[in-house]
Amino acid sequence: MPQPRKRARRYDSEKTRAAVTAQFAHVRQAVEGLTPEQLALPTRLGEWTVRELAAHIALVLRSVVRGVAAPEPAARDVVLLDWPAATRGFAGAVDEDTRELAEWADEAGGLRELYARTAEEFAGALAAAPDERLIVTRFGGMPLGDFLVTRTVELTVHTDDLNAAAGLAVPHDRQALAACTRVLADALASKAPGGSVELRVPPYAVVQCVEGPRHTRGTPPNVVETDPLTWARLATGRTPWREALADARLQASGDRADLAPWLPVLG
């Protein structure tokens, strides 16, 4: 029997806008202090160095600036939970745009200037458009409010990438981490609909997923539990399922509590 379609989760506009702004500010402070040696370090993102990663984090917000500046599209093409799977088709374009922006930054005064311009233009874009306004994204027409929620995922995940590559401890804004966790959990539930497994990512998300006998009361027979950053790494392919289990960063109990076949859910 097909599973009933769940009502989409709602996100608080003010909290989302504040979270994106705050997380970018955290990264900006760290990037401005990076040495040439740190900028040349490799990352876990293919051939990107820390320099390209830092440019890409600026691109995450510049995509909002570009979308608001463009004429409003005629139709909404993408809903929020379409976005995680849609990212897979744009890796090449993202890589090209990131490299171009990194080169532009070198010519325009460096990453410090890029981040200053980006913060200023992003603030202007937020002031100019309500959440309901459709904006142009590389995925199609999308409400600004939904697109901003996707930015919490990008910023959270890439802050973690930056910390891992450059040996930093850039903090994660609580609201950004919460929104990221919920989007990726809901994306899993959408990709593997059902009620036989309960995914718990305290304190931010609990979802049921995977086709099979539905749990209705008492302790679920199949439970997966982990922390928000480990979940983000699992959901985006940074950490393999078996590695997280072996390192005790993930607990999985029950015959069906293996989510590896449905991971990653992003890109």
Image: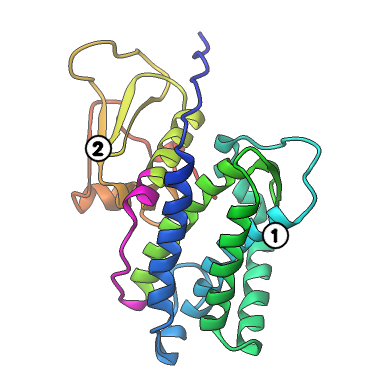
Query: Does the magenta run of residues contain 146?
Result: no
Q: Position of residue 13 (x, y in %)?
A: 49, 41
Residue at x 56%, y 82% (from the top left corner): 113
| Residue 180 locus on image (x, y percent) | 42, 46
- x and y, in percent, of residue 235 in the image: 42, 46
At 27% from the left and 50% from the top, the residue drawn is 244
Question: What is the spatial separation of the Cα atoms under label 2 and label 1, in whole angstroms?
Answer: 38 Å
Of circles 2 and 1, the one toward us is 1
Identify which amino acid the numbered label 2 is placed on.
Glu
**Mark 1, residue position:** 66
Display colour scheme: rainbow
Magenta stretch holds residue 170: yes
Residue behind mark 2: 225
- Farthest residue toward the front? 127
Q: Does residue 80 appear in the picture of this structure?
A: yes
Label 2 crowd (10 A; few <14 / some 14-19 / many >=20)? some
Give the residues in magenta.
166-178
Q: Name above or below for residue 246 compared with residue 133.
A: below
Mark 2 and 1 residues: CB-CB less than 8 Å, in contact?
no
Indicate the secondary structure of the residue bearing disc 2: strand
Residue 84 x/y as whole percent: 55, 43
Whichever of labels 2 and 1 marks the residue nearer the N terminus, that label is: 1
Q: Give the amino acid type for the residue marked by disc 1 in the picture.
A: Arg
Q: Residue extending furthest top?
A: 1
Can I make out residue 91 in this image?
no
